[in-house]
């Protein structure tokens, strides 16, 4: 087992009853704080930026019924697609209210198959008071490294065709299971950016050009044991280094009940966003989505006359 495989294994969710916990989270935060603080920045922006991207692996329990359990292995090691969709329905309504109340745009990477059901997350996002970045997370949430060129091409074509009916042209892509492949096809279908593979040893604060695409590199994964104090200190590092802090999570990460999800939002997300809003007001940082951050980079890279 390589060092990377060892640390990636630590990120695999452990089952506690029906709940899911990422035991490495607290260790990971401390490691990230130390390493990100000591590392020389690979890029400097005008100020720090905070990017939040959210993986919507299912989004609606009805998909579990439609797929008849055949897609479970592509979604989660322990929970059925139906169960994940049920949890995500609860979590989404609470998180979207939080972001809209703070007037903070984020990237929601959703499955194309969500267009097949009524009352989906997609409909809520289209009516949102805040213009969020609606990105793609595959059509069926299949591992792209296991798809042939033609299979991947078909998935991306299905996404583009179905999203077009809703007036959406997705430009941000989050690979299912964070397994990157077929970047040339992302370019073909007009994507501007993607989130590459991170992990305990590879997370950093930078954005870089890969061909015609931008890799909006992940900085920190958020789990149930996230420390709000360390999270603020890591944001301070990004501000001091004028770098992008890109945090991400799954909607199913924080428990099954409204009470558990609300507790996480109240104790972790609310303090973070409140703190970040103060920094935004002081002019030391901005909130960006994956897509809007590419526009900042385009402006930086434009030749000056």
Image: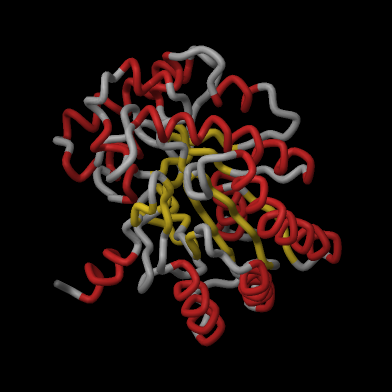
Q: Residue at x 63, y 36 (%)?
A: 132
Q: Quadrant of the C terminus?
A: bottom right
Q: Residue at x 49, y 76 (%)?
A: 32
Farthest residue, direction front: 17
Q: Give above or below for 25 relative to 34.
A: above
- Percent of width and height locating residue 230: 62, 74
Residue in front for this viewpoint, 179 or 1: 1
Q: Residue at x 47, y 55 (%)?
A: 216
Q: Quick check: 223 left or right of 179?
A: right
Q: In the image, 83: left or right of 142?
A: right
Residue 15 vs 10, above or below: the answer is above
Q: Is residue 20 left or right of residue 230?
A: left
Which is more toward the observer, 301 or 6? 6
> Which quadrant of the rendered structure holds the N terminus?
bottom left
Indicate whether 41 appears above or below 272: below
Q: Residue furthest bottom?
A: 38
Q: Position of residue 191 (x, y in %)?
A: 42, 38
**Spot occupied by residue 80 in the image (x, y as percentages of width and height):** 32, 33
């Amino acid at each position: 087992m390589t060092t990377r495989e060892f640390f990636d294994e630590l990120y695999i969710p452990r089952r506690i009853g029906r709940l899911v916990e990422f035991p490495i989270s607290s260790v990971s935060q401390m490691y990230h704080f130390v390493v990100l603080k000591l590392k020389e920045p690979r890029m400097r922006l005008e100020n720090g930026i905070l990017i939040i991207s959210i993986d919507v692996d299912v989004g609606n329990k009805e998909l579990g019924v439609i797929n008849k359990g055949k897609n479970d292995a592509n979604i989660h090691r322990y929970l059925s697609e139906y169960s994940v969709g049920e949890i995500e329905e609860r979590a989404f309504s609470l998180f979207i209210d939080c972001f809209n109340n703070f007037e903070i745009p984020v990237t929601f990477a959703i499955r194309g198959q969500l267009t097949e059901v009524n009352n989906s997350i997609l409909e809520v996002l289209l009516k949102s008071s805040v213009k969020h970045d609606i990105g793609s997370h595959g059509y069926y949430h299949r591992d792209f490294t296991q798809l042939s060129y033609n299979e991947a091409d078909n998935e991306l074509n299905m996404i583009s065709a179905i999203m077009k009916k809703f007036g959406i042209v997705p430009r941000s892509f989050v690979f299912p299971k964070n397994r990157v492949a077929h970047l040339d096809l992302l370019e073909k279908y007009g994507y501007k950016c993607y989130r590459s593979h991170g992990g305990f040893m590879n997370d950093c604060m930078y954005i870089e050009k890969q061909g015609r695409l931008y890799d909006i590199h992940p900085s920190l994964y958020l789990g149930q044991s996230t420390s709000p104090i360390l999270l603020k200190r890591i944001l301070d590092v990004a501000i001091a280094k004028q770098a992008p802090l890109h945090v991400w999570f799954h909607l199913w990460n924080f428990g099954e009940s409204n009470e558990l999800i609300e507790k996480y939002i109240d104790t972790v997300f609310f303090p973070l966003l409140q703190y970040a809003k103060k920094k935004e007001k002081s002019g030391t940082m901005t909130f960006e989505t994956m897509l809007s951050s590419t526009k900042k980079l385009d402006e930086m890279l434009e030749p000056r006359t």
